[in-house]
């Protein structure tokens, strides 16, 4: 793939029957998409899981979190016992690729079941 930009080219016929001609070739930035599988949902409080978003361009993907979770790289920790975790994968593009559309994933917090044994007769 050529870098984006404007290139001046000369077209010629190898047989020599047609004269050479100059032209301009413009290479625009390419589209890209993010692949980001939906994490297992719901997840209990304290659960730690890894996600692995990737961009079709091969450029690094940024990940942000909001709600009931925190991030350390691509490692997600559920930090609250209620609510939802919102994960947003982004790729801003570069000289050769346009920005990718953001991909949003939501992971719900699992309700905890509390078991209290009841001892009768004592």
Image (tube, helix red, strand yellow):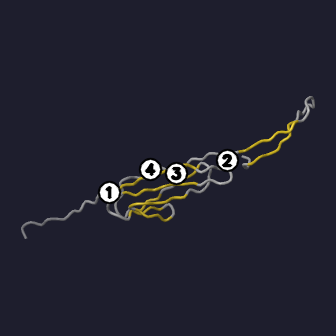
Q: Residues within 10 Å of mark 2 (few under 14, many from 20)?
A: some
Going from N to C along the chain, the mark reached first, 2 or 1, is 2
Above or below: residue 89 compared with residue 73:
above
Separation (CA) of disc 3 from disc 1: 26 Å
Mark closer to the chain start, 2 or 4: 2
Label 1 SS: loop
> Badges 2 and 4: C-beta atoms under 8 Å apart?
no
Q: Position of residue 117 (x, y in %)?
A: 17, 65
* Label 4: which secondary element: loop
| Residue found at the far right of this picture | 16
Is there CB contact under 8 Å for labels 3 and 2?
no
Question: In the figure, is residue 102 to the left or right of 19?
Answer: left
- Residue 38 circle label: 4
Task: From the image, tell me which residue sits under label 1.
Answer: 110
**Could you say which disc has been placed on residue 102 in the image?**
3
Name the N-terminal-most of marks 1 and 4.
4
**Of the residues under marks 3 and 1, which one precedes in the sequence?**
3
Q: Is residue 54 left or right of residue 80?
A: right
Task: Give how far across and how far down residue 62 sits, in percent.
Answer: 54, 58
């Amino acid at each position: 793939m050529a870098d984006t930009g404007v290139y001046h080219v000369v077209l010629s016929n190898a047989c020599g029957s047609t004269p050479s001609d100059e032209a301009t070739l413009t290479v625009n930035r390419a589209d890209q998409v993010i692949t980001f599988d939906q994490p297992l949902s719901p997840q209990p409080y304290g659960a730690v899981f890894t996600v692995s978003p990737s961009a079709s361009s091969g450029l690094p993907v940024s990940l942000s979190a909001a709600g009931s979770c925190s991030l350390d790289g691509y490692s997600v920790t559920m930090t609250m016992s209620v609510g939802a975790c919102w994960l947003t994968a982004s790729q801003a593009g570069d000289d050769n690729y346009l920005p990718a559309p953001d991909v949003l994933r939501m992971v719900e917090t699992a309700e905890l079941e509390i078991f209290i044994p009841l001892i009768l007769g004592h």
